[in-house]
Image (cartoon, rainbow, N blue to C red):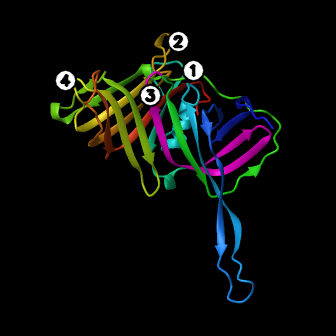
Amino acid sequence: MLVHGCDCWIAIQTFHNVIVVPYVSETIRDDIIFLQEEAAIEGDGAVKGLLKNNGVTGCVVTPLTLKNVPILFATAFGFATIPAFVSGTRNLYQHFMILSPMEDCDGFNVYKQRGSERKFIKDCRINSFELRIEREQSIKLKLDVCSDKPSTVYLDEEPMRAETGERFYSENVTYMINDTSVGFVSVEYKNIYGVTILCKKENGTITELWIRRILEQDSDLPKHINEIIITAKLLRDTYEENQYGTFSITLRNLVLISDETNIECADAVMGQLHYFVNGIVSADTFTVGDKAS
């Protein structure tokens, strides 16, 4: 049987909304473990074994779009406040998310279709995620999904429409850094060409920030960052309200733990800085309409 990419989709269902997300890759599978029983003293001495369904595990990588950012960030971060109306606009809502441990997050359901295979996974959690901003590419979010319940087959014949929307790209991202050594003043760093936010949410939250930057004289990033705000925007002249088509992520109290810069090159020196995040991680997104997720 041939299965084409257009025949596959994943839908995420939360308490507020359900949305079909486009994805680059997906590995969500039943987590099957093998239980082995030692040979009995009496009998033929054969070791017995059986398979046990231990729930569901895997990941999905999806590009961030105008329509799916609120629900994807809500499932990844884990805590989202009630959408607040933004004054001065006709119909605009702000969503504020705070990173919380996996145990403190609300569960969500996943519908998956791969060709003729249709699976329903209940009470999923995100045990880790990565936000990738790479040079000249769309911004992607990798979600590591797990559930202690086995997947089931659903028979709904009504096809779901994918909420594609306009994608966010790395060239429209700004990086504002507040360095404690020069006072509480935020400065835009333009020598950053990519970042990766990595978060593990088991037994608390552990967050790291990898920054890829071009090394420039007298303008390198500080070893301690009080606050960094990463803001991604779509084209301003496309939308009536200024905030619509925008999301931002704020990370506080970062310390440098490794510098992987290699200066043995003839061209511009590029390298990766590895920061550990000691403070709060939060996100803001904006949507329009009364059906804001």
Is tag 4's residue or tag 2's residue first in the polypeptide sequence? 4
Q: Taking the image as drawn, is residue 83 in sight?
A: no
Q: Do the residues labelled 2 and 1 touch (CB within 8 Å)?
A: yes
For the residues marked 3 and 4, what is the alpha-carbon distance in whole angstroms? 23 Å
Q: Find disc 3 in the rendering and name its residue.
A: 134
Q: Residues within 10 Å of mark 1 (few under 14, many from 20)?
A: some
Image disc number at residue 94: none
Rendered view: 74 above or below 51: above
Q: Which residue is drawn at 53% across and 18% down?
A: 90
Q: Quadrant of the N terminus?
A: top right
Q: Are marks 4 and 1 in contact (CB under 8 Å)?
A: no
Frontmost residue, 52 versus 228: 52
Rendered view: 139 above or below 147: above
Q: How crowded is mark 2: few (under 14 residues within 10 Å), some or many (20 or more)?
A: few
Is tag 3's residue or tag 1's residue first in the polypeptide sequence? 3
Range of the magenta residues? 107-136
Q: Find disc 4 in the rendering and name its residue.
A: 217
Residue 274 falls inside the magenta stretch: no
Frontmost residue, 95 versus 270: 270
Which amino acid is tagged 3? Glu
Relative horizontal placement of residue 20, taking residue 137 as reference (left or right): right
Is tag 3's residue or tag 2's residue first in the polypeptide sequence? 3
